[in-house]
Amino acid sequence: MELRDKKVIVTGGVRGLGRRMVERLAAKGARVTVFDLDAAGLEELGRRVGVAGCVECDVSDYEAVAAATARYHDESGAADVLVNNAGILHSAPLIRIGPAGVERHDAAAWQRVLAADLSSVFYMTACVVEKMVATRTRGVVVNISSVSAAGNAGQSAYSAAKAGVNALTATWAKELSMMGIRVAAVAPGFTETESTREALSEAVLKETIKRVPLRRLGRPEEIADGVVHVIENDFFNGKVFELDGGLIL
């Protein structure tokens, strides 16, 4: 797909990897609209980056997604590309031994991660693809997964959510390809972002980098380039493009 003048929705595009994706897509001439919870961040993004629009929306809330995408479609028509990037990074084992003794993984945290990282992908894709199909738009859906989908110790909820994203990617590619819609995923390894630094201690991060053959974290712009590649390559479909520096979990 040639990105120039294409309508692209990116969720969670205010900061981190999402911000780099927005900047890269805009540089390619795409008309990018960002869906994000951060109202102040959206305002700043709108001033600094040439985006077509900013939509304040909690993509883990189905009713909010349905309303926000309906407004988008009324104003802009069907999107050509959806990038499901929004999510949260949470690290916690199933069981830990703490000051109070043996503690279980917090059930509320489990629900928050599944809602933000998996349900949001389902909600946004259902609402955006519905319009693509109705207008016979030959679109692309890119889901941002993670190498943690393979199962990363200490990330029960996050790993489960990203494994679900990979399963949805394969399922939807089989369902939607006959309608001219490609679905693929990009799975970053450990990347130099604020969320990575917040989720992992310095000691854990150093040990992780030692296991990466390239001996470094990924750069956000490298992940953004991977997303652009998946969109532009019309034969990439139903697969997960892993960008992890050779890391095997």
Image (cartoon, rainbow, N blue to C red):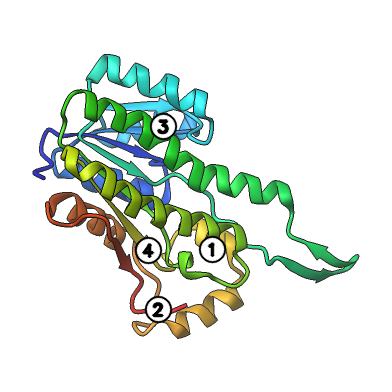
Amino acid at dot 3: Leu
Query: Which element is circle 2 on?
Result: loop
Q: Give the mark, 1 or 3, whose residue is nearer the N terminus.
A: 3
Figure label count? 4
Q: Earlier in the sequence, mark 3 or mark 2?
A: 3
Q: Which residue is mark 2?
A: 247
Q: Give residue 198's position: percent from left, percent from top.
A: 58, 59
Instruction: Look at mark 1 in the image and give the residue it sits on.
Output: 197
Q: Which residue is mark 3?
A: 42
Mark 2 Cα shell of 10 Å, populated few (<14), some (14-19), many (≥20):
some
SS at circle 4: strand
Label 1 neighbour load within 10 Å: few <14, some 14-19, many 20+: few
Residue at horizontal 16%, vertical 28%? 136
Residue drawn at point x = 44 percent, y = 34 percent: 123
* Lateral position of residue 27 relative to residue 145, left or right: left
Q: Could you say which is closer to the camera, residue 22 or residue 59?
A: 59
Q: Is residue 22 above or below residue 193?
A: above
Q: Earlier in the sequence, mark 2 or mark 1?
A: 1
Q: Amino acid at mark 2?
A: Leu
Q: Amino acid at mark 4?
A: Pro
What is the distance, in whole Å, between disc 1 and disc 3 at their CAs?
A: 23 Å
Mark 2 and mark 1 in contact? Answer it, CB < 8 Å. Answer: no
Residue at 77% in and 69% down: 96
For the residues marked 4 and 3, what is the alpha-carbon distance in whole angstroms? 24 Å
